[in-house]
Amino acid sequence: MIDFLTTYHLQGLLLGLCSFLIIGIFHPIVIKGEYRYGQRFKWFFLLVGIALCVGSLSVKSMWLSALLGVGAFSNFWGIKEMGEQQERVRKGWFPRNPRRTYYWDDKDQDSNVNPTED
């Protein structure tokens, strides 16, 4: 298989396709993770990202190392994306989890309280 890819110079295209698929898989993971676990899910992304970085440095295969590296940095990107996903939920672009309280609910209630009039 590697000989075929090398002969026809398809290695870069295959690596690009695999990167595209890995990144595409992370969109629903971020959405579902924020919905079910909230911002605590960032720790999952951090731990998996670190593990994949170590794995990428440990393997000898260039292909596997590159794919593990793409997976690692996709996890690190997921940490940033979790904050943005929470903002999208706040704006109403994505559904809220009814079993969870959101930090902006407390702020909204405080700002809606009318001061007592004399």
Image (spheres, rainbow, N blue to C red):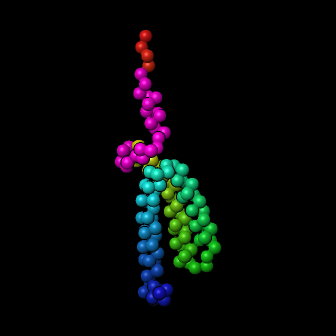
Residue farthest to the top? 118
Query: In this rendering, is residue 109 above or below 14?
Result: above
Left of 94 or right of it: where is 100?
right
Viewer can see residue 93: yes
Q: Residue 12 in the image: x percent, y percent? A: 46, 77
Closer-to-camera residue (99/19): 99
Residue at 37% x, 48% y: name it: 95
Closer-to-camera residue (46/73): 46
Residue farthest to the front? 99
- Any magenta on residue 64? no
Q: Residue 60 in the image: x percent, y percent? A: 61, 79
Q: Residue 108 in the image: x percent, y percent? A: 43, 33
Q: Residue 101 in the image: x percent, y percent? A: 47, 41
Viewer can see residue 87: no
Residue at 57% x, 54% y: name it: 43
Which residue range is magenta in the image?
91-114
Residue at 44% x, 19% y: name it: 115
Query: In this rendering, is residue 25 above or below 34?
Result: below
Residue farthest to the left? 93
- Any magenta on residue 93? yes
| Count of numbered badges drawn on the protein | 0
Residue at 36% x, 44% y: name it: 92
Query: In this rendering, is residue 17 above or below 87?
Result: below
Left of 102 or right of it: where is 48?
right
The image quadrant where one finds the C terminus is top left
Left of 63 or right of it: where is 98?
left
